[in-house]
């Protein structure tokens, strides 16, 4: 299996820790976030990984070149221009190529997700993309119809919606995205018509009109988003208790 790690973000919510280093190299339990993410993907059989870089990108490149993770690690360089999640994936696929689905994982997400089970569900559903989700407090919710297909997005604070609004008049499921998803090359090729910079969620909502984009609900998902400094201690405890390297 192969994966892409989103590691290009500015990490503004982690300041001052990211004033002189990228978010991906902020340490937890003595190891960078990027290390933990790579090792976790390896546990589920990933053997090829693409990492995108922007903010202090040369530090990530040096780190990856200086360490042997036992898997093939490539770099997608966005130091010239930060491309957002959709644009970053589009550029990475230009290097990745191939026909095997790509697992996409945010570098600052820690969870007990069974990525192999997610991959198996993706294949069993003949999906072109599968997004890991759960019922949890979040102002931004993805909306699926009863068959699990993505239909819309809603901001609960502002009532803004995107996608197929007719789903709100039907039985539906509202779920929070976990920052882990799987996408097929057949869908990645649809990105050729998109600009250099765009959101992957907006892309999925566009594609959901004509393609099988599945929301995979994990009822027992435990997740920590290390977006803020106060989440680091919780993530450190989570790694110590749930993830063995």
Image (cartoon, helix red, strand yellow):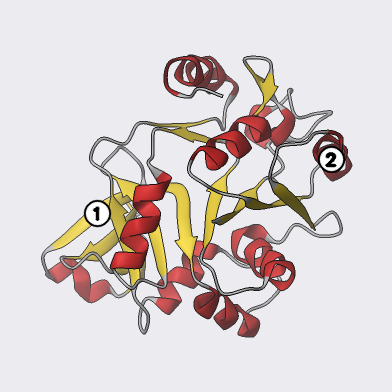
Mark 1 element type:
strand
Camera-side residue: 104 or 176? 104
| Place of residue 159 in the rendered image (x, y in percent of width and height, measured from the top left) | 32, 57
Relative placement, left or right, of 31 versus 134 is right
| Place of residue 118 in the rendered image (x, y in percent of width and height, measured from the top left) | 36, 52
Q: Is residue 159 visible?
A: no
Q: Can residue 134 be seen in this view?
A: yes
| Place of residue 151 in the rendered image (x, y in percent of width and height, measured from the top left) | 30, 70
Seen from this angle, which residue lies furthest left?
171
Residue occupying the point 36% across, 66% down = 123
Q: Earlier in the sequence, mark 1 or mark 2?
A: 2
Residue 240, placed above or below residue 79: above
Mark 2 element type:
loop
Residue occupying the point 81% across, 60% down = 81
Residue at the spot of label 2:
56
Residue 127, placed above or below residue 225: below
Quadrant including the N terminus: bottom right
Label pair 1/2, CB-CB below 8 angstroms = no
Q: Are there few (<14), some (14-19), or many (20+) residues within 10 Å of tag 1?
A: many
Relative placement, left or right, of 155 versus 172 is right
Q: Are there few (<14), some (14-19), or many (20+) residues within 10 Å of tag 2?
A: many
| Place of residue 163 in the rendered image (x, y in percent of width and height, measured from the top left) | 36, 73
Residue occupying the point 86% across, 34% down = 66
Residue occupying the point 71% across, 68% down = 91
Instruction: Count the marks.
Output: 2
Q: Which mark is residue 9?
A: none
Residue at the spot of label 1:
174
Residue 244, placed above or below residue 184: above
Residue 49, placed above or below residue 61: below
Quadrant location of residue 21? Answer: top right
Quadrant including the C terminus: top right
Quadrant location of residue 193? Answer: bottom right
């Amino acid at each position: 299996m192969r994966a892409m790690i989103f590691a290009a973000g500015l990490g503004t919510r982690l300041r001052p820790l990211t004033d002189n280093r990228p978010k991906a190299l902020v340490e937890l339990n003595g190891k960078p976030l990027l290390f933990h993410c790579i090792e976790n993907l390896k546990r589920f059989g990933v053997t090829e990984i693409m990492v995108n870089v922007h903010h202090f990108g040369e530090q990530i490149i040096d780190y990856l070149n200086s360490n042997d993770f036992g898997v093939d690690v490539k770099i997608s360089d966005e130091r010239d221009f930060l491309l957002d999640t959709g644009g970053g994936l589009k550029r990475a696929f230009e290097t990745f190529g191939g026909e095997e689905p790509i697992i996409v994982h945010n570098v600052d997400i820690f969870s007990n997700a069974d990525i192999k089970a997610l991959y198996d569900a993706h294949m069993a559903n003949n999906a072109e993309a599968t997004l890991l989700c759960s019922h949890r407090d979040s102002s931004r919710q993805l909306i699926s119809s009863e068959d699990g297909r993505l239909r819309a997005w809603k901001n609960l604070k502002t009532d803004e919606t995107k996608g197929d609004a007719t789903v709100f008049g039907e039985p539906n499921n509202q779920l929070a995205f976990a920052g882990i998803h799987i996408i097929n090359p057949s869908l990645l090729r649809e990105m050729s018509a998109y600009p250099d910079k765009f959101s992957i969620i907006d892309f999925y909502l566009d594609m959901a009109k004509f393609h099988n984009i599945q929301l995979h609900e994990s009822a027992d998902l435990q997740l920590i988003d290390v977006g803020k400094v106060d989440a680091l201690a919780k993530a450190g405890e989570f790694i110590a208790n749930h993830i063995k390297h």
